[in-house]
Amino acid sequence: MSIKLQTQSYLTFKLQNELFAINVGDVLEILEMSPITKVPKSPAFMRGVINLRGNILPVMDARNKFAMPDAEFTIDTCIVVLNIDSGKEPLLVGAIVDSVQKVIDIPDEDIQVSASMGAMYREDFITGIGKVEDNFVMILNIDKVFSADDVYAITES
């Protein structure tokens, strides 16, 4: 069983024009885009794998997970390496995002749970909505968005 550090600090990133956040305790590093090796018969959200210091890192397309249209990669497109709770050993996965913004602090009292987001996104993907300056940021539950079952699906195909 892995234990993850949860803080009030969040890494913010963009997909299309939407701002999302992931708890920094779930983020291991941010990589520049690199060539991705496709895996035959993998699900559409699974872009493939990359070599991360001698280890195979499955890479998922965050846009696809949120039913957003594909977009060309830009200089800002990057891979966020995440630590997913698999219930067993730590599981690393890469998530392609349009651009990483910054690390921000959002106190728990500034995070609201919103059932209305279920109309746009799967309810279990969003843990809450934070207000940062004049913007709203959707805080993700990465263990649901990028689940261990998704990773196992590619490794078994």
Image (tube, grey):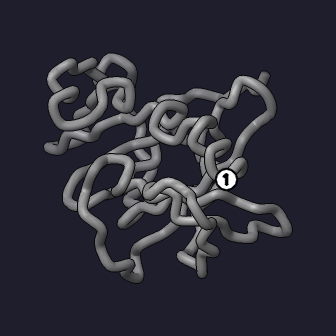
Disc tally is 1
| Quadrant of the rendered image containing residue 97 | bottom left
Q: How far across and how far down the image is residue 15, in percent?
A: 30, 58
In the image, 64 versus 77, the foreground residue is 64
Could you tell whether 121 is left or right of 27 in the image?
Answer: left
Q: Is residue 6 left or right of residue 132?
A: right
Residue 85 on image: x %, y %:
65, 30
Q: Quadrant of residue 139?
A: top left
- Residue at x-position 85% and y-position 68%: 54
Residue drawn at point x = 45 percent, y = 31 percent:
141
* Viewer-side residue, 6 vs 123: 123
Q: Position of residue 108 (x, y in %)?
A: 38, 20
Q: Is residue 131 above or below residue 62?
A: above
- Residue sitting at 68 percent across and 69 percent down? 50
Q: Which is nearer the eye, 132 or 43? A: 43
Q: Secondary structure at mark 1?
A: loop
Locate residue 154 relative to residue 52 in the image: left or right: left
Q: Looking at the image, which residue sits at the far right?
A: 54
Instruction: Compare residues 47 and 18 and report the one nearer the observer.
Output: 47
Name the residue carrying label 1: 157
Q: Residue at x 60, y 36 (%)?
A: 149
Quadrant of the image containing the N terminus? top right
Please name the amino acid that badge 1 sits on: Ser
Q: Quadrant of residue 39?
A: bottom right
Mark 1, other Cα within 10 Å: few <14 / some 14–19 / many ≥20:
few
Q: Is residue 65 left or right of residue 147?
A: left
Residue 148 x, y percent position in the rendering: 63, 36
